Image (cartoon, grey):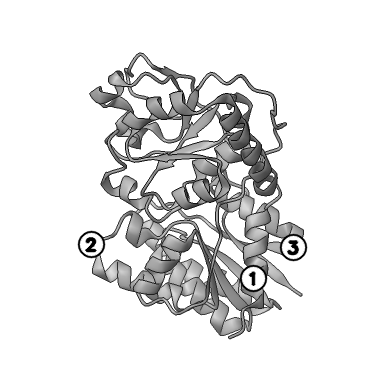
C-alpha cells in the first residue's frame, strides 16, 4: 500500500517543522508511510505581495505537479499549515488528482486557539475537517467539541502526543519535590505573577524569552533544543500550565488547555516525569486515569499536595510515568490511532 505523510516546508532551508509534526512522520515511517515533500516556502508572518504571488504559483503549478502522477492509497496531512488558502487548495488537488484516503492529524484547532470570535475562519475550519476521510484529534474533550460544531468526519482520539526521545531513561531519583517547567516563556505570564513569590516549591525553568526577573523560588536554566532538553529533566514533576494567573489557566492559551494536549506534557512523560496539570485541562483525564501525576485547581495547592504525597505514592507515579514513557518513545499512540482510523468503514 502506498501511504504518505505530507511535509510542507523546503527541506533545504532551516525551517523544519515543529517537533510534534516531525515525530508523527518519524513514527508513521515504522508503519510503512513515506514522506511526501511539497517544498513550499511558507512563512506565516510574511504578508507581502511577493508571498501572496508565491502561493498562487504554488497552487497553480507546484502542488498539482506533486499529485498528478502520484499513486497513493492514503495521504496524511498534518494540520494546521498556517495558510487557509494553501490548505484548501492542497485538499482540492488531492481530491482532483488522486483517489487516496485523506486523513488529518490535528496539532491545533485554530478556532479554539486563536480565532474563537472569527465566524468566517471557524466556518472554513469546520469545512476543512468535513472535507477529509478521517481525523486524529487530541482527546475526548476535543472530539466532543468537534461533534458539537457539526464535524461528521470519523474521529479517533490520540490520547497524548508521542515524543521521539533517545535520552536514556532515569529510573533512579531523589524525591526532593522538585518541579520543572519548559516552554515559550514569553507567553507564560503566570511565572512573573507577584503571587508566585508566596509559593514554596522550587521550580527549574527552561525556554526562550525569559523575563528579566523571577521569584526567588524560580531558577532559570537556559534554553535548549528539543533534542538536548531531556538531558536536563531530572526533577520529580513536570508542570503543565498556561495563561496569566496562578489561580487557574486563563486567557486564550489557558482556556485552550481545556481541549488540547500540550506537547510539553509529552516531553516530561517521555523523560519519565510525572506531571502536574490544571483540573479543568483535557489532559487531566489522562493523568488521573494513568496515575502519572496529579491535577490542581490552582498552583497554590501544589505545596500542600507535595507534602501529602509519600515517597511510596510518588514511586508508583514514577513507575507509571516510566511505563507511559516507553509507549510515547515508540510512537504507540499515533500508531494505534492510525490503525483504528484505517479500519473505519465509510
Residue 206 visible in rendering: no
Residue at numbered disc 1: 340
Describe the element under mark 1 as helix, strand or loop: helix
Q: Nearer the viewer, mark 1 or mark 2?
A: 1
Residue at numbered disc 3: 31
Q: Is residue 262 above or below residue 309?
A: below
**How many neighbours does mark 2 have within 10 angstroms: few (below 14), some (14-19), or many (20 or more)?**
few
Quadrant the C terminus occupies: bottom right
Left or right: 27 in relation to 94: right
Name the residue rendered at 58%, 40% in the picture: 269
Describe the element under mark 3 as helix, strand or loop: helix
Give the image location of residue 333, x and y in percent.
Answer: 63, 56
Q: Is residue 37 above or below residue 186?
A: below
Give the image location of residue 92, x and y in percent.
Answer: 49, 78
- Among the two numbered marks 2 and 3 on one chain, the one whose residue lies closer to the N terminus: 3
Q: Is residue 45 above or below residue 54?
A: above
Q: Quadrant of residue 4?
A: bottom right
Name the residue rendered at 60%, 82% in the picture: 97
Give the image location of residue 28, x and y in percent.
Answer: 69, 59
Residue at numbered disc 2: 117
Q: Which is more toward the observer, 263 or 246?
A: 246
Name the residue rendered at 62%, 31% in the picture: 315
**How many neighbours does mark 1 have within 10 angstroms: few (below 14), some (14-19), or many (20 or more)?**
some
Amino acid at each position: 500500500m502506498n501511504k504518505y505523510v505530507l511535509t510542507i516546508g523546503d527541506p533545504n532551508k532551516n525551517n523544519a517543522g515543529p517537533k510534534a509534526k516531525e515525530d508523527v512522520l518519524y513514527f508513521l515511517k515504522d508503519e510503512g508511510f513515506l514522506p511526501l515533500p511539497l517544498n513550499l516556502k511558507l512563512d506565516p508572518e510574511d504578508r507581502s505581495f511577493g508571498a501572496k504571488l508565491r502561493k498562487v504559483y504554488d497552487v497553480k503549478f507546484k502542488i498539482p505537479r506533486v499529485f498528478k502522477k502520484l499513486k497513493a492509497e492514503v495521504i496524511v496531512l498534518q494540520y494546521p499549515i498556517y495558510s487557509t488558502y494553501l490548505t484548501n487548495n492542497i485538499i482540492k488537488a488531492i481530491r482532483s488528482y488522486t483517489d487516496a484516503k485523506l486523513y488529518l492529524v490535528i496539532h491545533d484547532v485554530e478556532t479554539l486557539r486563536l480565532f474563537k470570535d472569527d465566524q468566517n475562519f471557524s466556518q472554513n475550519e469546520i469545512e476543512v475537517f468535513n472535507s477529509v476521510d478521517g481525523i486524529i484529534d487530541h482527546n475526548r474533550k476535543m472530539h466532543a467539541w468537534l461533534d458539537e460544531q457539526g464535524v461528521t468526519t470519523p474521529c479517533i482520539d490520540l490520547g497524548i502526543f508521542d515524543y521521539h526521545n533517545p535520552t536514556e531513561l532515569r529510573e533512579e531519583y531523589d524525591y526532593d519535590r522538585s518541579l520543572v517547567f519548559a516552554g515559550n516563556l514569553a507567553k507564560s505570564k503566570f511565572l512573573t505573577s507577584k503571587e508566585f513569590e508566596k509559593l514554596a516549591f522550587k521550580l527549574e525553568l527552561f525556554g526562550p524569552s525569559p523575563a528579566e526577573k523571577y521569584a526567588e523560588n524560580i531558577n532559570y536554566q537556559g534554553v535548549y533544543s528539543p533534542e538536548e532538553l531531556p538531558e536536563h529533566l531530572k526533577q520529580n514533576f513536570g508542570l503543565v500550565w498556561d495563561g496569566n494567573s496562578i489561580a487557574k489557566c486563563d486567557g486564550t492559551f489557558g482556556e485552550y488547555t481545556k481541549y488540547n494536549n500540550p506537547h510539553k506534557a509529552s516531553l516530561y512523560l517521555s523523560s519519565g516525569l510525572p506531571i502536574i496539570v490544571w483540573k479543568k485541562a483535557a489532559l487531566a483525564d489522562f493523568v488521573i486515569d494513568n496515575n502519572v501525576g496529579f491535577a490542581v485547581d490552582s498552583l497554590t495547592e501544589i505545596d500542600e499536595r507535595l507534602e501529602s504525597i509519600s515517597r511510596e505514592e510518588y514511586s508508583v507515579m514514577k513507575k507509571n510515568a516510566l511505563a507511559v514513557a516507553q509507549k510515547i518513545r515508540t510512537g504507540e499512540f499515533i500508531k494505534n490511532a492510525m490503525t483504528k482510523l484505517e479500519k473505519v468503514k465509510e
